[in-house]
């Protein structure tokens, strides 16, 4: 390469010297050195994350974890409450079925059997609830049609004879009794909170 450029210098004078200088400047060693210099200039520095970036990331992560935990806790509480309410409703329905069975048997007021004996057996009584250790089931029957609440269709003719003389407090009144209005109230504790479930029901004789 250099001998060729010297020949050009002999023939063309100054033009040959320019080509020689360019050839020297474009030598492989110089090109490699120049490239290494450029790589050093544009090489990125590996400094890592700053303290502010780390704290911001940790804060966002903590908020997400807290939100997930709160959602899980509320879900568990809701599931527990739903399960306890289901058990409470089942207990109330079981008691209603028991009262209905009492009302359906042949009338025997002296033995507290039949629909006429429902008032004497269940009015103002409180019963334990095996399904709920903290549960108490209280029952209120309404002794005459004038005391029957509106939710139960009051005033209500209890023996369907068209007069207001129905009185469950009088034993003889049960001989032709057709309807016993009552309210069942179940109270229980769930997660340290007092809960109450109320059911209004008209007990009628469903069999002959």
Image: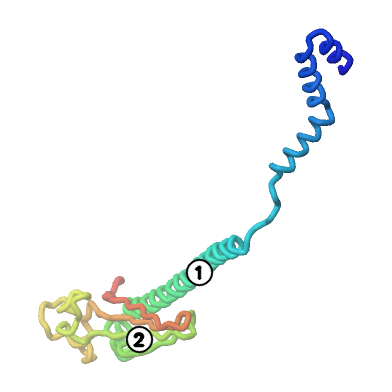
37 vs 152, left or right, is: right
Other-residue count near label 2 (Cα within 10 Å), few / some / many at <14 / 14–19 / ≥20: some
Q: How is the image coloured?
A: rainbow
84 vs 51, left or right, is: left
Q: Quadrant of residue 34?
A: top right
Viewer-proximal residue among 165 and 11: 11
Q: Position of residue 44 (x, y in %)?
A: 69, 46
Q: CA distance from mark 2 to mark 1?
A: 36 Å
143 vs 84, left or right, is: left
Residue 43 circle label: none
Q: Is residue 72 above or below residue 131?
A: above
CB-based contact (under 8 Å), mark 2 and mark 1: no
Q: What residue sits 25% from the left and 79% below the top?
A: 181
Q: What residue sits 71% from the left and 43% below the top?
A: 41
Q: Quadrant of residue 49?
A: bottom right
Can you say which quadrant of the picture contains the N terminus?
top right
Q: Secondary structure at mark 2?
A: strand
Q: Which residue is mark 1?
A: 70
Q: Which residue is mark 2?
A: 138
Viewer-proximal residue among 55 and 85: 55
Can you say which quadrant of the picture contains the C terminus?
bottom left
Q: Position of residue 192 (x, y in %)?
A: 46, 83
Q: Secondary structure at mark 1?
A: helix
Q: What residue sits 24% from the left and 91% below the top?
A: 171
Other-residue count near label 1 (Cα within 10 Å), few / some / many at <14 / 14–19 / ≥20: few
Circle 2 or circle 1, nearest the eye: 1
């Amino acid at each position: 390469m250099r001998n060729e450029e010297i020949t050009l210098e002999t023939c063309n004078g100054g033009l040959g010297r320019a080509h020689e200088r360019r050839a020297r400047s474009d030598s492989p060693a110089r090109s490699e050195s120049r490239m290494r210099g450029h790589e050093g200039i544009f090489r990125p520095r590996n400094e890592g994350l700053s303290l502010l970036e780390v704290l911001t990331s940790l804060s966002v992560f903590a908020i997400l974890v807290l939100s997930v935990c709160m959602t899980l806790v509320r879900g568990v509480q809701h599931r527990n409450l739903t399960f306890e309410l289901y058990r409470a409703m089942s207990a109330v329905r079981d008691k209603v079925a028991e009262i209905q069975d009492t009302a359906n048997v042949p009338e025997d007021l002296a033995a507290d059997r039949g629909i006429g004996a429902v008032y004497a057996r269940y009015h103002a009584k409180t019963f334990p609830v095996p399904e709920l250790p903290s549960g108490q089931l209280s029952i209120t029957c309404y002794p005459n049609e004038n005391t029957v609440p509106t939710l139960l269709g009051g005033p209500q003719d209890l023996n369907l004879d068209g007069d207001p003389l129905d009185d469950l407090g009088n034993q003889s009144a049960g001989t032709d009794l057709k309807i016993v209005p009552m309210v069942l109230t179940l109270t229980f504790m769930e997660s340290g909170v007092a809960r109450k479930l109320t059911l209004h029901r008209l007990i009628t004789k469903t069999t002959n």
